[in-house]
Amino acid sequence: MSTFKDPSAVSSYQQTAQAKVPGMAALHRMTHILLAESVPPTGEVLVLGAGGGLELDAFAQAQPGWRFVGVDPSLPMLDLARETLGAKASRAVLVEGLIEDAPEREFDGATCLLTLHFLDPDARLKTLRELFQRLRPGGVLVVAHHSYAPEARMRWLRRSAAFASVDGVLNEQAEASIAVMAEKLPAISAADEVALLQAAGFTDVELFYAALSFRGWVARRPL
Protein backbone atom coordinates (compact mmCIF):
# COMPACT_ATOMS: atom_id res chain seq x y z
CA MET A 1 0.00 0.00 0.00
CA SER A 2 3.02 2.28 -0.53
CA THR A 3 1.00 4.05 -3.23
CA PHE A 4 -0.92 5.78 -0.44
CA LYS A 5 2.25 7.53 0.69
CA ASP A 6 2.96 9.02 -2.72
CA PRO A 7 2.06 12.75 -2.63
CA SER A 8 0.38 12.77 -6.05
CA ALA A 9 -1.66 9.67 -5.25
CA VAL A 10 -2.72 11.12 -1.90
CA SER A 11 -3.75 14.46 -3.38
CA SER A 12 -5.93 12.77 -6.03
CA TYR A 13 -7.21 9.93 -3.84
CA GLN A 14 -10.67 11.28 -3.06
CA GLN A 15 -11.44 12.10 -6.69
CA THR A 16 -10.11 8.81 -8.07
CA ALA A 17 -11.77 6.70 -5.38
CA GLN A 18 -15.17 8.21 -6.06
CA ALA A 19 -14.68 7.61 -9.79
CA LYS A 20 -13.67 3.98 -9.31
CA VAL A 21 -16.13 2.81 -6.64
CA PRO A 22 -19.72 2.71 -7.91
CA GLY A 23 -22.04 4.66 -5.61
CA MET A 24 -19.34 5.52 -3.07
CA ALA A 25 -21.42 8.22 -1.39
CA ALA A 26 -24.35 5.81 -1.23
CA LEU A 27 -22.03 3.16 0.24
CA HIS A 28 -21.12 5.57 3.03
CA ARG A 29 -24.79 6.40 3.61
CA MET A 30 -25.75 2.72 3.76
CA THR A 31 -22.87 2.04 6.13
CA HIS A 32 -24.07 4.80 8.42
CA ILE A 33 -27.59 3.35 8.43
CA LEU A 34 -26.25 -0.09 9.37
CA LEU A 35 -24.03 1.32 12.11
CA ALA A 36 -26.87 3.41 13.53
CA GLU A 37 -28.89 0.25 14.18
CA SER A 38 -26.48 -0.53 17.03
CA VAL A 39 -24.36 2.53 17.75
CA PRO A 40 -26.05 4.88 20.26
CA PRO A 41 -26.28 8.65 19.61
CA THR A 42 -23.15 9.23 21.69
CA GLY A 43 -21.34 6.07 20.63
CA GLU A 44 -17.80 5.42 19.44
CA VAL A 45 -16.89 3.91 16.06
CA LEU A 46 -13.60 2.34 15.00
CA VAL A 47 -12.73 3.06 11.37
CA LEU A 48 -9.97 0.84 9.96
CA GLY A 49 -8.50 2.18 6.74
CA ALA A 50 -9.56 5.72 7.63
CA GLY A 51 -7.08 7.50 5.36
CA GLY A 52 -8.65 10.15 3.16
CA GLY A 53 -11.45 10.70 5.62
CA LEU A 54 -14.44 10.43 3.28
CA GLU A 55 -16.33 7.90 5.38
CA LEU A 56 -15.30 9.59 8.62
CA ASP A 57 -16.68 12.86 7.30
CA ALA A 58 -19.92 11.23 6.15
CA PHE A 59 -20.48 9.54 9.53
CA ALA A 60 -19.56 12.68 11.48
CA GLN A 61 -22.00 14.78 9.50
CA ALA A 62 -24.81 12.26 9.93
CA GLN A 63 -24.23 11.71 13.66
CA PRO A 64 -23.03 14.82 15.54
CA GLY A 65 -22.75 12.85 18.80
CA TRP A 66 -20.52 10.05 17.53
CA ARG A 67 -16.80 9.90 18.29
CA PHE A 68 -14.25 8.04 16.18
CA VAL A 69 -10.90 6.32 16.20
CA GLY A 70 -9.49 6.16 12.68
CA VAL A 71 -6.57 3.85 11.90
CA ASP A 72 -4.45 3.84 8.73
CA PRO A 73 -0.84 2.88 7.93
CA SER A 74 -0.30 6.02 5.82
CA LEU A 75 0.41 9.25 7.69
CA PRO A 76 -0.19 11.40 4.57
CA MET A 77 -3.61 9.80 4.15
CA LEU A 78 -4.41 10.51 7.80
CA ASP A 79 -3.38 14.12 7.24
CA LEU A 80 -5.85 14.23 4.36
CA ALA A 81 -8.52 12.75 6.64
CA ARG A 82 -7.86 15.46 9.23
CA GLU A 83 -8.13 18.14 6.53
CA THR A 84 -11.35 16.60 5.21
CA LEU A 85 -12.93 16.54 8.67
CA GLY A 86 -12.09 20.18 9.35
CA ALA A 87 -13.74 21.31 12.59
CA LYS A 88 -15.14 17.78 13.10
CA ALA A 89 -11.58 16.47 13.55
CA SER A 90 -11.90 17.20 17.28
CA ARG A 91 -14.23 14.18 17.48
CA ALA A 92 -11.71 11.79 15.91
CA VAL A 93 -8.48 10.28 17.17
CA LEU A 94 -6.34 9.31 14.16
CA VAL A 95 -3.80 6.52 14.65
CA GLU A 96 -0.98 5.69 12.24
CA GLY A 97 -0.66 1.91 12.05
CA LEU A 98 -2.58 -1.32 11.64
CA ILE A 99 -5.48 -2.81 13.59
CA GLU A 100 -3.07 -3.97 16.30
CA ASP A 101 -2.30 -0.30 16.98
CA ALA A 102 -5.95 0.55 17.68
CA PRO A 103 -6.95 1.02 21.32
CA GLU A 104 -7.80 -2.27 23.02
CA ARG A 105 -11.28 -1.40 24.19
CA GLU A 106 -14.80 -2.22 23.03
CA PHE A 107 -16.29 0.08 20.40
CA ASP A 108 -19.99 0.33 19.57
CA GLY A 109 -19.34 -0.25 15.87
CA ALA A 110 -16.55 -0.63 13.34
CA THR A 111 -15.99 -0.25 9.62
CA CYS A 112 -13.33 -1.38 7.17
CA LEU A 113 -14.05 -0.01 3.70
CA LEU A 114 -11.88 -0.55 0.60
CA THR A 115 -9.10 -2.07 2.69
CA LEU A 116 -9.36 -5.83 3.28
CA HIS A 117 -8.76 -6.69 -0.39
CA PHE A 118 -5.09 -5.76 0.17
CA LEU A 119 -4.69 -8.63 2.66
CA ASP A 120 -4.24 -12.33 1.99
CA PRO A 121 -6.73 -14.66 3.69
CA ASP A 122 -4.53 -15.36 6.73
CA ALA A 123 -3.83 -11.67 7.37
CA ARG A 124 -7.48 -10.86 6.72
CA LEU A 125 -8.68 -13.40 9.27
CA LYS A 126 -6.23 -12.03 11.82
CA THR A 127 -7.50 -8.51 11.16
CA LEU A 128 -11.13 -9.58 11.46
CA ARG A 129 -10.39 -11.28 14.78
CA GLU A 130 -8.74 -8.09 16.06
CA LEU A 131 -11.81 -6.12 14.97
CA PHE A 132 -14.06 -8.64 16.70
CA GLN A 133 -12.14 -8.21 19.96
CA ARG A 134 -12.60 -4.44 19.72
CA LEU A 135 -16.39 -4.58 19.42
CA ARG A 136 -18.78 -4.72 22.34
CA PRO A 137 -21.21 -7.67 22.36
CA GLY A 138 -23.94 -6.77 19.89
CA GLY A 139 -21.64 -4.33 18.08
CA VAL A 140 -21.77 -4.19 14.30
CA LEU A 141 -18.99 -4.40 11.70
CA VAL A 142 -19.39 -3.14 8.13
CA VAL A 143 -16.87 -4.14 5.43
CA ALA A 144 -16.74 -3.48 1.69
CA HIS A 145 -14.02 -4.10 -0.89
CA HIS A 146 -13.17 -5.98 -4.09
CA SER A 147 -14.49 -9.54 -3.93
CA TYR A 148 -14.60 -12.09 -6.75
CA ALA A 149 -13.67 -15.68 -7.40
CA PRO A 150 -10.01 -15.94 -8.47
CA GLU A 151 -10.92 -17.49 -11.80
CA ALA A 152 -13.19 -14.51 -12.58
CA ARG A 153 -10.85 -11.73 -11.44
CA MET A 154 -9.87 -10.45 -14.89
CA ARG A 155 -13.48 -10.24 -16.04
CA TRP A 156 -14.58 -8.27 -12.98
CA LEU A 157 -11.53 -6.02 -12.86
CA ARG A 158 -12.03 -5.11 -16.52
CA ARG A 159 -15.65 -4.22 -15.81
CA SER A 160 -14.67 -2.02 -12.87
CA ALA A 161 -11.95 -0.35 -14.93
CA ALA A 162 -14.46 0.36 -17.69
CA PHE A 163 -16.75 1.98 -15.12
CA ALA A 164 -13.93 4.25 -13.96
CA SER A 165 -13.05 5.34 -17.50
CA VAL A 166 -14.71 8.36 -19.07
CA ASP A 167 -16.29 6.50 -21.98
CA GLY A 168 -16.10 2.87 -20.87
CA VAL A 169 -13.16 2.21 -23.19
CA LEU A 170 -10.00 0.67 -21.75
CA ASN A 171 -6.80 2.36 -22.90
CA GLU A 172 -3.24 1.12 -22.39
CA GLN A 173 -2.99 2.78 -18.98
CA ALA A 174 -6.19 1.08 -17.83
CA GLU A 175 -5.02 -2.29 -19.11
CA ALA A 176 -1.74 -1.89 -17.24
CA SER A 177 -3.65 -0.98 -14.05
CA ILE A 178 -5.84 -4.07 -14.42
CA ALA A 179 -2.77 -6.30 -14.70
CA VAL A 180 -1.23 -4.78 -11.56
CA MET A 181 -4.46 -5.17 -9.57
CA ALA A 182 -4.89 -8.75 -10.70
CA GLU A 183 -1.38 -9.52 -9.45
CA LYS A 184 -1.41 -7.48 -6.23
CA LEU A 185 -4.94 -7.87 -4.85
CA PRO A 186 -5.53 -11.23 -3.12
CA ALA A 187 -9.30 -10.88 -3.50
CA ILE A 188 -11.45 -13.88 -2.63
CA SER A 189 -14.93 -15.10 -3.46
CA ALA A 190 -18.07 -13.95 -1.69
CA ALA A 191 -18.51 -17.37 -0.10
CA ASP A 192 -14.98 -17.25 1.30
CA GLU A 193 -15.59 -13.70 2.60
CA VAL A 194 -18.56 -14.92 4.62
CA ALA A 195 -16.60 -17.92 5.87
CA LEU A 196 -13.77 -15.68 7.13
CA LEU A 197 -16.19 -13.37 8.95
CA GLN A 198 -17.78 -16.39 10.62
CA ALA A 199 -14.38 -17.90 11.46
CA ALA A 200 -13.49 -14.62 13.19
CA GLY A 201 -16.57 -15.04 15.40
CA PHE A 202 -19.10 -12.81 13.64
CA THR A 203 -22.73 -13.84 13.18
CA ASP A 204 -25.70 -12.48 11.22
CA VAL A 205 -23.48 -11.92 8.17
CA GLU A 206 -25.51 -10.21 5.45
CA LEU A 207 -24.65 -8.86 2.01
CA PHE A 208 -25.83 -5.24 1.61
CA TYR A 209 -23.78 -3.87 -1.29
CA ALA A 210 -22.83 -5.30 -4.68
CA ALA A 211 -21.39 -3.12 -7.44
CA LEU A 212 -19.36 -4.75 -10.21
CA SER A 213 -16.22 -6.12 -8.48
CA PHE A 214 -17.12 -4.65 -5.08
CA ARG A 215 -19.12 -6.35 -2.33
CA GLY A 216 -20.08 -5.25 1.18
CA TRP A 217 -21.27 -7.15 4.25
CA VAL A 218 -22.62 -6.26 7.66
CA ALA A 219 -21.94 -8.62 10.57
CA ARG A 220 -22.33 -8.61 14.32
CA ARG A 221 -20.47 -9.69 17.43
CA PRO A 222 -22.99 -11.88 19.24
CA LEU A 223 -24.38 -10.86 22.61
Image (cartoon, rainbow, N blue to C red):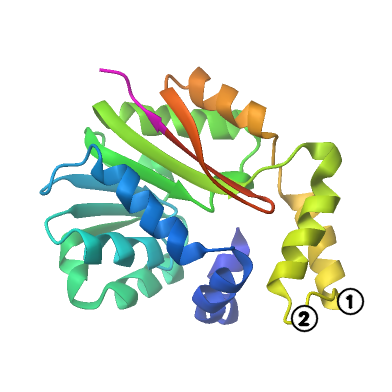
- Pointer 2 or 1: first along the chain: 2
Q: Residues within 10 Å of mark 1 (few under 14, many from 20)?
A: few
Does residue 222 belong to the magenta stretch? yes
Element class at badge 1: helix
The mark lying in front, picked from 2 and 1, is 2
Q: Is residue 9 visible?
A: yes
- x 56%, y 27%: residue: 194
Q: Label 2, on which residue?
A: 167
Quadrant housing the N terminus: bottom right
The vertical placement of 156 against 136, above or below, is below
Q: Are marks 2 and 1 in contact (CB under 8 Å)?
A: no
Residue 131 x/y as whole percent: 38, 34
Residue 172 is tagged as 1
Place residue 9 in its image quadrant.
bottom right
- x 15%, y 45%: residue: 43
Place residue 163 in its image quadrant.
bottom right
Amino acid type at image mark 1: Glu
Residue 214 x/y as whole percent: 62, 50
Element class at badge 2: loop
What segment is highlighted magenta in the picture?
A: 219-223
Amino acid type at image mark 2: Asp
Q: Residue furthest right?
A: 172
